[in-house]
Amino acid sequence: MKRLLIQFALLATVFFGTLFLLRQVNWLSVLKIEKATKSLDENLGKTFWKLYSETEQEIKDHSITAAIDSLVETLCDDNAIDKTNIKIHILNKDEVNAFTLPNNYLVIYTGLIKACDNEAELLGVLGHEIAHMEKNHVMKKLVKEIGLSVLISMSSGGSGEAIKEAAKVLSSTAYDRDLEREADLASVEYLLKSNIDPEPFANFLFKLSENEDDLPEQAFWISTHPESRERAENIIAYIKGKTIKKNKILTPKQWVELKKEIVD
């Protein structure tokens, strides 16, 4: 009985102590900060995308956009990610690149699609970029590289040159090593839940790492995601012993047609 009374007293102390701490939090301030952060994210996304939309050629061909959309949609549906929040834009550029902007803009260059030998390679890269979105890596990177005060200024009509430099940070500079690893392994988990083999994603990194010291200037996704061989080895080690299914989203014919449309 004495033991039960002591346990009850401890539980009561924890309960009322937690209640007291919660009451000290200014929840109105917390909600205001969250609202301000969301507004900043949205404004920056629109600002950066406006820059790209005015200077780059966007692909509008339905046969291309529908194929990419189906790949992203499958990853999202199988991983409880709200795909309606993701804004997919395909730009006609030979650079091997894909990146995310604030407010869930996913920008994909045609050069990346050309460089992938199969849909699983492309899915690995797309999953990696979606992971950056889901884990809020984009804003973490911008705050670290640019500074919060400068970002706030940009979102309310800052200088054009500053906006260009900030956009370049997202498209052509690397995330922290830990964030890159986190995004790689999150992508692998996305693929596994979609019954997609993650090994081609590792192979894609291996393939590019073979020429990493002699990469063409346009291979931005590799230059901004260095140490490709080590990352590939981490993926292979991570999936070792796991049950791997090798389903496909696009039919072989659809994949060939996508590649053909991109080349043409």
Image (cartoon, rainbow, N blue to C red):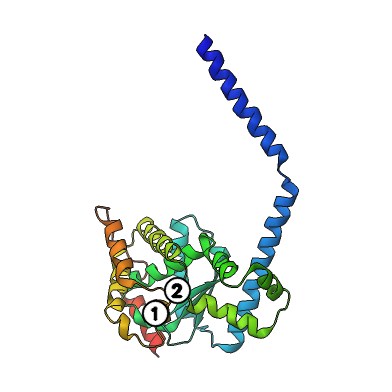
Q: Residue at x 43, y 74 (%)?
A: 67
Q: Where in the figure is residue 30, as x and y percent of width and height?
A: 70, 51
Which is closer to the viewer, label 1 or label 2?
1
Q: Nearer the viewer, residue 45 or 161?
A: 161
10 Å neighbourhood of mark 2: few (<14), some, or many (≥20)? many
Instruction: Name the residue tied to disc 2.
Output: 68
Instruction: Determine the CA span between mark 1 and mark 2.
Output: 10 Å
Q: Where in the figure is residue 58, as x and y percent of width and height?
A: 53, 84
Q: Report helix, strand or loop for mark 2.
A: helix
Which quadrant, please, contains the C terminus? bottom left
- Tell me the number on the disc at residue 12: none
Left or right of 230 in this view: 92:
right
Q: Residue at x 54, y 88 (%)?
A: 57
- Give the residue type that dot 1 points to: Ile
Instruction: Name the residue tied to disc 1.
Output: 113
- State yes or no: discs 1 and 2 in contact (Cβ < 8 Å): yes
- Determine the image quadrant of residue 36: bottom right
Q: Where in the figure is residue 233, as x and y percent of width and height?
A: 28, 65
Q: Would you place residue 260 above or below residue 4 in this image?
A: below
Q: As drawn, which residue projects farthest toward the left?
A: 241
Q: Residue at x 60, y 28 (%)?
A: 14
Q: Residue at x 34, y 72 (%)?
A: 227
The disc, 1 or 2, on the residue closer to the chain's N-terminal end is 2
Q: Would you place residue 71 above or below residue 112 in this image?
A: above
Q: Nearer the viewer, residue 4 or 60?
A: 4
- Determine the image quadrant of residue 179: bottom left
- Give the residue type that dot 2 points to: Ile
The answer to whether any part of residue 131 appears in the image is: yes
- Determine the image quadrant of residue 248: bottom left
Left or right of 238 in this view: 178:
right
